[in-house]
Amino acid sequence: MKLYWSPVELASRLARRGVKYNFASGAPDPDLLPFDELRKSFERVYEEYGKAIIAYPGAGGLRELRVELSRYVNRVLGINANWRDVIVTAGAQHAIKLLSQLLMRRRTVVYVEDPTFVETVAPMKFQGAKLIGVPIDNEGMNIHELERLVKIHGPGIVYTVPNCHNPTGVSLSRDRRKHLIEIAREHELTIIEDDPYTSLHSNAEPTLKSMSDDVVYVGTLSKVLGPGLRIGFVITNGALRNNLEKLEQHDFAASTLNQYLVYDLLRRGVADDVVRRARELYPRKLRELIEALDEYLPNALIYRPICGFYAFINTGVNAWELLRRSIRQGVVFVPGGKFFISGAKENTARLSIGSIRIDLIREGVKTLSSVIMAT
Amino acid sequence: MKLYWSPVELASRLARRGVKYNFASGAPDPDLLPFDELRKSFERVYEEYGKAIIAYPGAGGLRELRVELSRYVNRVLGINANWRDVIVTAGAQHAIKLLSQLLMRRRTVVYVEDPTFVETVAPMKFQGAKLIGVPIDNEGMNIHELERLVKIHGPGIVYTVPNCHNPTGVSLSRDRRKHLIEIAREHELTIIEDDPYTSLHSNAEPTLKSMSDDVVYVGTLSKVLGPGLRIGFVITNGALRNNLEKLEQHDFAASTLNQYLVYDLLRRGVADDVVRRARELYPRKLRELIEALDEYLPNALIYRPICGFYAFINTGVNAWELLRRSIRQGVVFVPGGKFFISGAKENTARLSIGSIRIDLIREGVKTLSSVIMAT
């Protein structure tokens, strides 16, 4: 049975014991979540739609939400999509699980950045997919290397977080994007673009989906409106769209109430407001993290993060042992070993600026560095 | 690709065009749903828990909800369960999908009532399971026949709705329950008990789970508090519990907000109030349906329904063709062919009293009978 606990979950359990410097969580900044507006939206959909908000969800998702999502991705991400090609899921992780079930069987070849996000590849591994790690540098996935590997391992899926990569923070360069789309056409590769962070950064590169309609796009409102609403979506078309709609009916897990709430938050422009504020706050937080690392842990950064929530560092010592010590000083992070496809590097860690307060970042890095020095 | 649309979904799409007599939907009676209380619960958890209600859901579900669910199943269903053995899912359908992924592979033998609920077996078929239909009569699944089939096809899973069966409305007799549990022990069968309706009827038999702790129990709040909340649960233990908690992390689809809402509705006794009113209303509705059928379509009933939402009838003519005609008279139901495992009987239909108004049931059956007679 290919089942294991995510290191994010394990580190977060430690974090629940009241830590001061939470670099572990990929959750968005609580100060940005539109909590008052959520209450307003509840009142609005309660009055306007009545008991429809707790009826069974329809296949593919609430039509009103799908229409609003197609407008949102157009405004914010430059993606043109018919609302019928937007399939609502119970979060992006649910979307990736459904896509894994549809596209992957035992020995299906899946090319992923190495390191990659440990939680999204878990359902792929469960399907028995053969994950092939592709090296990543400051310009994102090495597409020449991908091409070389495809010639060895054959056609398959490319799972990628091209913008604001998790856990490295890098983005795929413009040239590599074009190259990736070319070789996907040439070698019959299906690209799954997992994209939770683009909307949060004004310096992010255009999405792959906006460059090629063949790309299967996975989006989410979790980082903008709150992860506990569990509303994500897939944009795709043709046979895959049809099969996804049917497979989604095997659990129809996306709450009707939350679909109405997100629909209302989108139509009232609340999501856009959050996006505006996010584009001011998260880059500042990431800069704060990088500057603190440069000062207190010079040479620790393995990649130069450009956007998103994460920095991936060399800890110099075993990261799980470091975590056990740093937690006593109030610092939690996610050890990086499990993010690797081949050859876990246990002396690495993912630091997230998602939910930690900006004024604690510097102090947290300083504390972490003192724990490392004392080792 | 083993994917198809459910006939419930297809019939419901027709029903959306404003039908008067909706016998298709398995949704609960809108008049019973505690809609005002839902608003109160929103306000309460909003004030009490703040932004925690839209944070990432934790593995296994919100602890407070799991504790309340363990009390609820004890009060209402006679099941003793430690809260740690209650795993929250995004509805019962999601629970059954997860269990199918854990317990079923290609050619795994799954014994099911024939007919059975077409939607819950869809994820089993997708896993490649080999479904073996076991005849069902007015006392539920024929356990002697099950035993005979097990000797031919070998050990595996028994998927059953022992109380208020969907689509036949029958319940497994006390003697057969004991027999089922005995042969499950003897032949290494894992029993999945799918139980959406027991709480709604005071005449229901004790759950299998209350008779044997080995049973894997699937419950839901959909019929009591509203299906759009997507909160269900599994009660199991040992390795399966641990694996289920991990597999649930591949999508963590159960909304945190809705977990808090259901938790609050349970702790304030709102669910118990609904259960009390349901136990008065649904038996009256089912009686009304049976009496109308006995009057206008005598001999149509294939089984004597005892509880739950459903009656399964012989329509005498192809049910999809009948549906196309009856819909013009405002009557919608679900054609029964797809509920069969072996040998679809296309001249059958499932009638549901779930969401139709009680005063429309008699008139609806009369109208349906006139359409049948005019054929």
Image: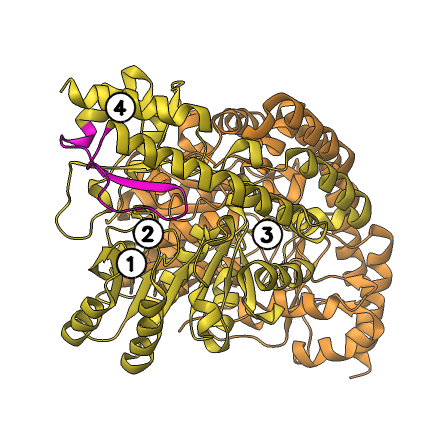
Chain colours: A yellow, B orange
Q: Residue at x 58, y 31 (%)?
A: B260
Is residue B186 shown above or below B317? Answer: above
Is label 3 in contact with label 1 (beta carbons under 8 Å)? no
Percent coordinates x, y for residue A213 in the rendering:
47, 75
Left or right placement of residue A118 versus residue A229 in this view: left
Indicate the chain on which mark 4 is placed: A
Percent coordinates x, y for residue A166 in the rendering:
34, 48
Q: Earlier in the sequence, mark 4 or mark 2?
A: 2
* Residue depth check, mark 1 versus mark 4: number of the one nearer the observer: 1
Q: Earlier in the sequence, mark 1 or mark 4?
A: 1
* Residue depth check, mark 4 versus mark 3: number of the one nearer the observer: 4
Indicate the chain on which mark 1 is placed: A
The picture quadrant where one finds residue A134 is: bottom left
- Residues at discs 3 and 1 both on one chain: no
Is residue A279 shown above or below B60? Answer: below
- Residues at discs 4 and 2 both on one chain: yes
Secondary structure at badge 4 equals helix
Secondary structure at badge 3 equals loop
Rendered image: mark on residue B170? 3
Write down the residue under mark 4.
A368
Q: Amino acid at mark 1?
A: Glu
Q: Residue at x 62, y 53 (%)?
A: B169
Write down the residue under mark 1.
A139
The picture quadrant where one finds residue B85 is: top left
Is label 3 in contact with label 2 (beta carbons under 8 Å)? no
Query: Which residues are drawn in magenta?
Result: A297-320
Q: CA distance from mark 1 to mark 2?
A: 6 Å
